[in-house]
Image (cartoon, grey):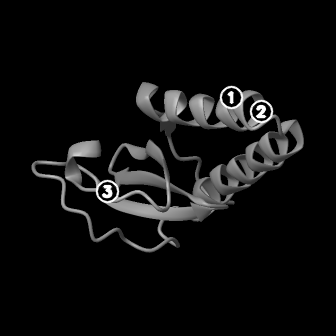
């Protein structure tokens, strides 16, 4: 049996996800797409929890970060998370077409 790892989500990642789902549902008037994306996010969380090192490392550099930064695609978005001795921390959920650098973390 695989040991349980600590799994946390930062407030900013929670806000990213909430904002994205709300935008899709309310602004784009597409509740089904929002529900589908929510399901994909939950699936990604499950994959990360089971196999945290399986996803590719991100090329982003975050100065003085305690994390091994990794990313997983979720639809048109990228879920960024960090691995550390303390476990997994979900850091951001950002549209995949956006230019991202270390300032987002």
Q: How crowded is the residue under tag 1: few (<14 C-alpha within 10 Å), some, or many (20+)?
A: some
* Chain-order first, disc 1 or disc 3: 1
Residue with the mark numbered 2: 25
Q: Can you say whether 5 is above or below 18 in the image?
A: below
The mark found on residue 54 in the picture is none
Asked if the residues shown at circle 2 and circle 1 are in contact, with their CB atoms under 8 angstroms apart, the answer is yes
Residue with the mark numbered 1: 22
Task: Name the residue located 37 percent from the left edge and 52 percent from the top edge.
Answer: 82
Q: Can you say whether 81 is above or below 19 in the image?
A: below
Find residue 58 and report its image quarter.
bottom left
Of residues 49 and 42, the one drawn nearer to the viewer in this rendering: 42
Residues under labels 1 and 3: Cα distance? 22 Å
Does residue 105 appear in this view? no
Q: Can you say whether 19 is above or below 32 in the image?
A: above
Asked if the residues shown at circle 1 and circle 3 are in contact, with their CB atoms under 8 angstroms apart, the answer is no
Residues under labels 2 and 1: Cα distance? 5 Å
Q: Can you say whether 36 is above or below 54 in the image?
A: above
Residue with the mark numbered 3: 100
Which quarter of the rendered picture does the C terminus lie within?
A: top left
Q: How crowded is the residue under tag 3: few (<14 C-alpha within 10 Å), some, or many (20+)?
A: few
């Amino acid at each position: 049996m695989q040991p349980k790892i600590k799994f946390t989500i930062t407030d900013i990642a929670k806000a990213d996800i909430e904002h994205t789902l709300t935008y899709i549902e309310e602004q784009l008037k597409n509740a089904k797409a929002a529900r589908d994306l929510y399901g994909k996010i939950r699936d990604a969380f499950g994959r990360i929890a089971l196999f945290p090192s399986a996803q590719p490392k991100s090329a982003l550099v975050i100065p003085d970060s305690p994390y091994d930064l990794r990313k997983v695609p979720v639809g048109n978005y990228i879920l960024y998370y960090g691995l550390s001795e303390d476990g997994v921390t979900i850091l951001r959920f950002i549209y995949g077409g956006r230019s991202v650098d270390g300032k987002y973390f």
